[in-house]
Structures are given as C-alpha cells and as structure tokens.
Image (tube, rainbow, N blue to C red):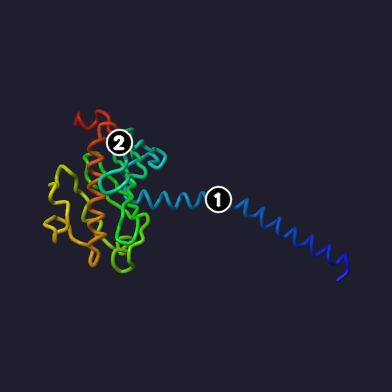
Amino acid sequence: MNRRGVLIVAVLALTGVAASVAWQHYCAPRIAAAEAQQQERAWLAVLPPDSYDNQPLQRPIALPDAELLHSRLQAGYLATLHGRTSAVLLHSRFAGYAGAIDLLIAIDRDGRVIASRVLQQQETPGLGGRIAEQDNTWLQGFNGHGQANTAEGAWALKRDNGQFDQLAGASITSRAVIHAIQDALRYFDQHASDWLGEEKTNE
C-alpha cells in the first residue's frame, strides 16, 4: 500500500473513532436518564401509586445514628401527598447468608410496613436468592406489621417461637430480613416526630 493509501486508511479510522466517541457522548445522557427512570420505577414500586404526589427519591432525609442493631441504613426518603408525609422509604443493608443484602422498606405514617423490595443480594440461588424473585411473595408477609401491632417476641421465625414463616431452605436469610425490618421500624418510631412533624400527634 502506498503512502496515500495508508493516509486514507488512517483518516477513515480516525473518522470512525471520532464518530463513535461523538455518538457515545450524544447517547450517554439519554442512557443515564433511562437507567435513572428504571431505577426510580423499581424503587417506587413499594408505594401504591395514589399514595404520593411528589418525587420521593428527590426528598432525601438525614439519618443520624444509622448503624442499627442488625443492619445499617444507607438512605431514607419522604413520600408526600398534598404536602403531608404519607410514607418513609428506608434503604437498609445487612448481612445475609452469602453476603450483603440491600432491602428497601416502605413504612406508612403509622409505623407499619407497606411493602419491601430487595435491591441487591448474593444469596444462594434457589434458596435465599429466591427473596429477590418477582413471583416470590414471602416479603409480603411483613406488610401491615409495625412495632405497635406486633409483639416484640413475635419478630422471629415460627420455628423460633415467633410469628413469621421461613423462606424455604433459607433460615439465616429469613432471620436476617426479620431483624432488618424490625430495626427499620424501631428507627421509624424513634424519628417519626421529625419526619411527620406534629401531624401524627394531632390525629
């Protein structure tokens, strides 16, 4: 190949690289926005659609003393409806059987679990890993429970003389989730006056 041919190939290669970089630069914000929207939908799935009218993930709350008995809170958010707090979202991280589990817990203004969702986990597939499967309803067993309507000793597996069923074949994972949810509920009760203001006491 002569010098002119080499120059043409080099120019075409550089043009191709430049076009690729420019396209990636053009698409990057759209991809990031789409990923953020997907994450937001996944996180807000724990809230009934008609229970809030704000953008909860844009209402972060301070979490003092976030290191709890069995877990650590990573973040918290406020959902509001007509300017009034309707729910608190707490992002909890705790040790499971095979590694850390990240759980999002939605708590209503009366301190009861609305719903919860696994964000990340490393549990054994087919056993503890089933906690993150969409068709697994085990986490729904905590919905409606709070510190006020569930006795302290009931926050345990039935095999441990508690109230809750075990995720089949995953007792360590099950116990870890129970402890983390109770941690979050205790924390909510401790800080409810800050998050709800005078609303709860006036009802």
Label 2 Cα crowd, 10 Å radius (few <14 / some 14-19 / many 20+): some
**Would you say the residues marked 1 and 2 are in contact, meaning their CB atoms lie under 8 Å apart?**
no
Horizontally, residue 103 falls left or right of residue 150, namely: right
Horizontally, residue 143 falls left or right of residue 124, namely: left
Horizontally, residue 5 falls left or right of residue 28, namely: right
Q: Looking at the picture, how far across and down is residue 78, in whole percent?
A: 34, 39
What residue is shown with label 1?
30
Q: In which quarter of the image is the C terminus?
A: top left
Q: Is residue 129 above or below residue 196?
A: below
Classify mark 1: helix, strand or loop. Answer: helix
Q: In the figure, residue 19 lies in which quadrant?
A: bottom right
Residue type marked 1: Arg
Q: In the figure, residue 1 lies in which quadrant?
A: bottom right
- The label shown at residue 85 is 2
Residue type marked 2: Thr
Q: In the figure, residue 159 lies in which quadrant?
A: bottom left
Front one among 185 and 48: 185
Q: Is residue 50 above or below residue 140?
A: above
